[in-house]
Amino acid sequence: MDVKLTPEEIILKLLKEKTSLQLDVRKNMADTLIMTKETLLEISKSLAQKTASFDKRINISYKEKSEFEATLTVAEDLLVFYLQTNVFIFDQSHPVWQSSYVKNNEANAYCGILSIYNFLSDSFTYNRTNDSGYLIARIFVNHEMHYFVEGKRQLGFLYNDFAQSVLDKKALTEIINSAIIYTLAFNLFVPPFDNIKEVSVSAMEEETNRMQLQTGKRLGFRFSADSDSVK
């Protein structure tokens, strides 16, 4: 016979089953970010050393911007790795629910998110605040440190075995390298003429390196419509 729970018992049940789970996910995401920063630093040092052997002008650098954010500059590209502080569960329409790993245990669907954005490095160097950046991948990690990636091209289909994949330094290195490859192959398009045919006097009077003429790799094109092919 079902026993009716008191309001306090319901609260305690939710705290035990849900909040404790979310705290486990948050702990894993904190560990993931630490591991990400360590990996980014190692990759930047390795690339900087090797590129210097053939062209010292190429800028490879790592920067820890805050507790939740780090960046990797690779030539003209800047990758921003940003940790969301909240824990999320997927909408029932999301393909992740088709996995028996999630069907058999709903707790596995609670994840933290590490997002990877691509900007032009000059946008930050010259403080061009109107420039556009693009989300290229999201790494989802749950309470068991299982992960999968939503993203563009190889980022979206190489790392999608949620039931079997456990995030470690090796996997993280592969994901970051894939993100770098994608951004380097992601060309800077000439902005459509109609998008920049007018410019204000104040913008033109700014210093050249701070002009507010918006720049982005796909300015004027919907990123969601990107065919994922390398142009």
Image: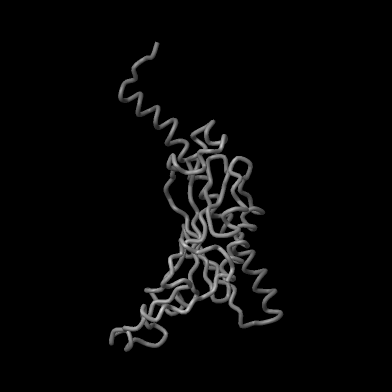
The structure's colour scheme is one colour
At which x and y percent is residue 33?
53, 54
Residue in front for this viewpoint, 213 or 19: 213
Compared to residue 157, the image places residue 19 above or below, namely above
At which x and y percent is residue 216?
45, 73
Q: How many marks?
A: 0
Does residue 174 appear left or right of residue 25 in this picture? right
The quadrant the N terminus occupies is top left
Residue at the (67%, 79%) spot, across then down: 52
At which x and y percent is residue 220?
41, 72
Residue that extends furthest to the top in the rendered view of this protein: 1
Compared to residue 84, the image places residue 214 above or below, namely below
Residue at the (60%, 60%) spot, across then down: 176
Residue in front for this viewpoint, 48 or 121: 121
Q: Quadrant of residue 162?
A: top right
Residue at the (29%, 84%) spot, across then down: 200
Does residue 179 appear left or right of residue 117 in this picture? right
Compared to residue 67, the image places residue 195 above or below, namely below
The quadrant the C terminus occupies is bottom right
Q: Quadrant of residue 177?
A: bottom right
At which x and y percent is residue 182?
58, 65
Residue that extends furthest to the left in the rendered view of this protein: 201
Residue in front for this viewpoint, 145 or 224: 224
Compared to residue 38, the image places residue 53 above or below, namely below
